[in-house]
Amino acid sequence: MTPSLPTGCVIALVGAESTGKTELARAIAQRLQDRGTPTTLVTEYLREWCEREGRTPRPDEQQAIADEQTRRIDTAAATGVVVADTTALMTAVYSEQLFADTTLYDGALAAQRRCAITLLTALDLPWVADDMRDGPHARQPTDTLLRAALAGAKLSYTVVHGSGGERLANAWNAINSIAGNEGRARTSRASGTRDRLGAKPASWSWPCEKCSDPECEHKLFSDLMARRD
């Protein structure tokens, strides 16, 4: 099944480091393109910046990085569907986590609100080190701050679990479910009916069939890793 996604629809992937955002974003964009949906993949500008400069940003450089990520997403959204490999919200989260700077949140959350679908990648993949990442110890604090920011702004998101094809299948199911709900909401609004979906179309919620409760998810993940040890 291919979701019906209008021009300007942004599917945003957010999540802690080494949780498969880039691989999943590429896979979603490729599947949409293969099925005839004009789709642009917007990659992570923060990583591009770090690779170009050979270092991580200073606190005073974070805002420009967040703004450029948003600019690229908005530009791509003018011509079709967008799959965004992170958004400015991740830069805001890193600014709080690393520099105790919360000033980026207002702009980042405003941009996030324009995203039709937000997929949050779960912490169930093994850590893969590279020169730009902090370490596995940083993943849960990042995840906690990210969920708190989304919840505080009353922005719905779907947690995506699984590895490989299962992760893609779970993300695809979520996209189809959310797109179907919005399609029904548009029909209701067009007919003048205000049902539950039509009343608040920006507040989609598609609970993961495994777990979308962070406390339960983190406990499950911790128990799994303990059994492996």
Image (cartoon, grey):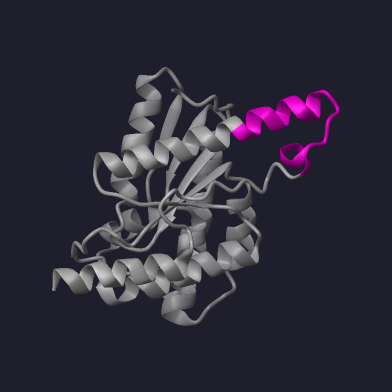
Residue 171 drawn at (x, y percent) = 40, 41
Q: Residue at left 82%, top 36%?
A: 194
When the figure is inspected, residue 178 is found, relative to residue 45, above or below; the finding is above
Residue 82 magenta: no
Q: Nearer the viewer, residue 47 or 38?
A: 38
**What segment carries the magenta color?**
181-199
Quarter of the rendering occupied by the N terminus: top left
Q: Is residue 118 among the parts visible in the rendering?
A: yes
Q: Residue at left 55%, top 28%?
A: 5
Q: Residue at left 46%, top 59%?
A: 65
Q: Is residue 62 among the parts visible in the rendering?
A: no
Q: Nearer the viewer, residue 164 or 40?
A: 164
Q: Residue at left 47%, top 40%?
A: 174
Residue 14 drawn at (x, y percent) = 44, 55
Question: What is the chief secondary structure element of the magenta stretch?
Answer: helix
Query: Outermost residue, right direction?
Result: 192
Quarter of the rendering occupied by the C terminus: bottom left
When the figure is inspected, residue 167 is found, relative to residue 229, above or below; the finding is above
Residue 3 drawn at (x, y percent) = 50, 26
Looking at the image, residue 17 sits to the left or right of residue 211; the answer is: left
Query: Outermost residue, top direction?
Result: 36
Query: Outermost residue, left direction?
Result: 229
Q: Nearer the viewer, residue 58 or 180?
A: 180
